Image: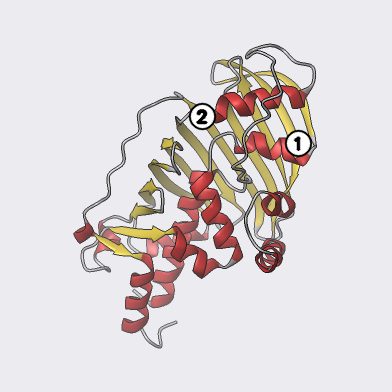
Amino acid sequence: MRTSTVRRVCLSVAAAAALTSVAACSGSDSGKSDKSDKQGSGVVKADPIAALLDVQKKTGGENSAKVEGTTQMGTTMSMKQTGVIDWTDGLTGTMEITYTGGSMADAMKQSGGTGTMQARYFKDGYVVNMGDGFAKQTGGKHWINYGYADLAKMAGASGEAMKQQMQNTTPDQGVKSLLASGDVKKVGKEDVRGVSATHYSGTVDVAALTAKNSELDADQLEQLKKQLSDAGITTETVDIWVDDNDLLVKKTERGQMKTGELNSTVFYSDYGTKVSVEQPPASDTVDFAELLKQQQGAGAGAS
């Protein structure tokens, strides 16, 4: 396989696994919820901000959940995912990701993949099983290991921001995004997969929210804003649905990119579910950075 193909596939897999775990571009915020809000759970509140503070507190107080969703990024990729995540100490969990269309699905087919892969998330990175077809190109190794630190170095400011997101993400990030935006309204009561839920909606400035909730320095922030601008990402419409126990049950994010529409939908259920994740055997794993070095060495001059 040519070096450019390996790099493109590996980077697309990294992006897919990252997007799946954080459910697109929600901002990360390690701050605690407002303890001054004393209203009880399940009480109907006229003020959407007061209601969302309760949702942030209740959902943020949970440690794990089942997730299921879909993501589309213009003509680049569309995918569906299902799995379980735990955010007690960084993000851990397992996810099955299937490419359903876009140029990345074509790249996966070219690499010998089936379009479906398993991702396992750990505190400092994640691993992805690329399947038997890819293993034939990598000395029999099925798993690629992506360290957050390595991805941050390769992707610059956007990689550093992603690293912070991946290490701090929780399902209530969509709630925090709406609270931070200052633009939120209550839409009304709706049914979500048989559950009665309250619908809230708002618009988020992606660059401003990421800057506010990250630990990037001034130079990194400027680089991030340029990267987002080059991709055509400016604002997102975020919608969340909350059940009568103040738990998030659904979140959607919609925005526009230069390659087309960004659209993500995630369902949350079974809060408190048990999550167990094992590292694959080292003998069946290749490090992402090392894989690129090997391919560059073996395929010098390929394009």
Where residue 117 sits in the image (x, y, percent)? 36, 49
Corner quadrant of residue 281: bottom left
Placement of the N terminus among the 4 image quadrants: bottom left
Q: Amino acid at mark 2?
A: Tyr
> Badge 2: how crowded within 10 Å, few (<14), some, or many (20+)?
some
Judge whether 55 appears above or below 217 on screen: above
Where is 200 relative to 230, above or below?
A: above
Q: How many marks?
A: 2
Q: Which residue is mark 2?
A: 268
| Residue 202: mark | 1
Q: Distance from label 2 to label 1 (Cα)?
A: 20 Å
Q: Which mark is first along the chain, 1 or 2?
A: 1
Q: Quadrant of residue 200?
A: top right
**In percent of the image, x 34 and y 70: which residue is there?**
291
User: What residue appears at the point 62 percent right and 56 percent down from the top-left corner?
Assistant: 215
- 5 versus 180 height, above or below: below
Left or right side of 255 for 70: left
At label 1, the amino acid type is: Gly
